[in-house]
Image (cartoon, helix red, strand yellow):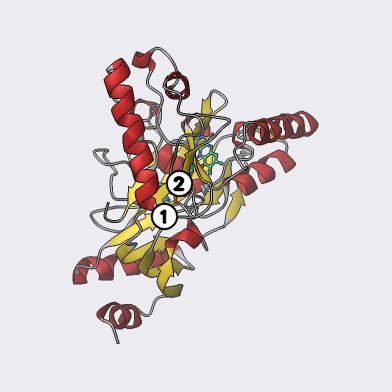
Amino acid sequence: MSTLRKFLEKCNIDAEIAYDEPMARHTSFRIGGPADALVRPRTAEAAAALLAAARDDGVPVAAIGGGANLLVADSGVRGIVLSTDLLRGLGRGGDGSLYAEAGLPVVELVRHAILDGRAGLEFAAGLPGSVGGAVYMNARCYDREFADALVGVDYLDPRTLGPATAAVDRGAWAYKRTPFMPGGALSGALILGARFGLAAGDRAALEARAAELEADRATKGHFDYPCAGSVFKNDRSFGRPTGRILDELGFRGRRVGDAMVSPKHANIFVNAGRASAADMRALIAMAIAEARAAFGVELEPEVVMLGDF
Ligand SMILES: Cc1cc2nc3c(=O)[nH]c(=O)nc-3n(C[C@H](O)[C@H](O)[C@H](O)COP(=O)(O)OP(=O)(O)OC[C@H]3O[C@@H](n4cnc5c(N)ncnc54)[C@H](O)[C@@H]3O)c2cc1C
């Protein structure tokens, strides 16, 4: 029996566990080699117990949500991938706020808010991924971002591994930047759930807006191929969106193997068949190098790389 299997049996936590699990099954790119173990805790307490035991035994753990912003290496991930997939609770506050556990898909959060006639989350209609991932990334679309609606975030403190709550200090949240990212005050914390402050809204109007945005995503080709949304961040100092820069370089349709730049949007790279992570990484590196050479700009990937590249 492998050491990792023994470790997880010793932990005996309330979780679903799969060994040598292909990460291609858990990423929207449909790319990625096996995780030694994919662990899906059924409760926040089980997640905390797993992290504490892993720390004691020196077992590496990487957290994922919906896998909609991840490029996982072809060689996979050593140690444990902790997925929040089974933490999907949803609660309503008397003040009209909504509380969602980290693993709840954003589309379900948005649907519940709209059904309740609460406004403030409809901008995220059709956004792939989980609540935890959207909080971690401060996901942004249609001129709004998650931090606009967030009131507080529950997480496991990275030092004590005990539960804690952070009020959302807007100063620490910016475009695609949150305290949970490397370098932030809460880097390494596992997000357990988030509370959203929402205003009363007209349900029919909210439904219409959500349908409009979902249709816009479909028109832009978001769901034509497996992808992870925009590959690079935008940067105001470039004077134009990254997609425009890549258009000027003729990137639409560019390929490395089956990794391809979307024919509809130059900042969306897709898996056109059997793309490997190495193909996708090479296409990303090509875009960075050409943008640097032509315009002197440094494109910064938004997609998170996991595993050994
Ligand atoms: C078709 C398509 C369209 C998209 N459009 C947009 C868009 O308009 N705007 C936008 O911002 N993004 C967009 N994305 C990207 C993606 O939807 C977002 O980045 C999303 O928020 C990722 O959430 P996730 O749960 O899938 O995170 P994952 O991809 O699983 O993880 C992303 C990062 O978050 C961390 N993380 C996840 N959960 C937790 C947790 N509970 N605690 C601590 N860390 C955690 C992971 O460690 C990783 O670093 C799009 C993706 C696709 C496939």
Q: Give above or below for 189 relative to 11.
A: above
Circles 1, 2 touching at the beta carbon (< 8 Å): yes
Instruction: Mark yes or no: residue 95 visible.
Output: yes
Q: Which residue is mark 1?
A: 64
User: Which image quadrant: the N terminus?
Assistant: bottom left
Q: Check disc 1 and report its element: helix, strand or loop.
A: strand
Q: Which residue, given by chain and number where applicable, does mark 2 sit on?
A: 133
Q: Where is residue 245 drawn, in percent x and y? A: 42, 20
Badge 2 element = helix
Residue 158 x %, y %: 27, 53
Q: Is residue 92 positioned above or below 302 on the image? A: below
Q: Amino acid at mark 1?
A: Ile
Answer with left or right where residue 217 lies relative to residue 180: right
Q: Residue at x 49, y 55 (%)?
A: 274
Q: Position of residue 256 (x, y in %)?
A: 41, 43
Q: Position of residue 24 (x, y in %)?
A: 47, 59
Quarter of the image for residue 301 reads top left
Residue at the (62%, 42%) spot, across then down:
224
Left or right? Give the position of 20 relative to 258: left
**Left/right of residue 294 with respect to residue 127 in the rendered view:** left
* Residue 300 visible in the picture: no
The structure residue drawn at horizontal position 52% and vertical position 49%, both measured from the top left corner, is 130
Label 1, residues with CA under 10 Å away: few <14, some 14-19, many ≥20: many
Q: CA distance from mark 1 to mark 2?
A: 7 Å
Q: Residue furthest top?
A: 239
Pointer 2 residue Cβ closer than 8 Å to ligand 1? yes
Mark 2 nearby-residue class (10 Å; few <14, some 14–19, many ≥20): many
The yes-or-no answer for disc 1 within 8 Å of ligand 1 is yes
| Foreground of the two, 171 or 227 | 227
Identity of the amino acid at label 2?
Gly
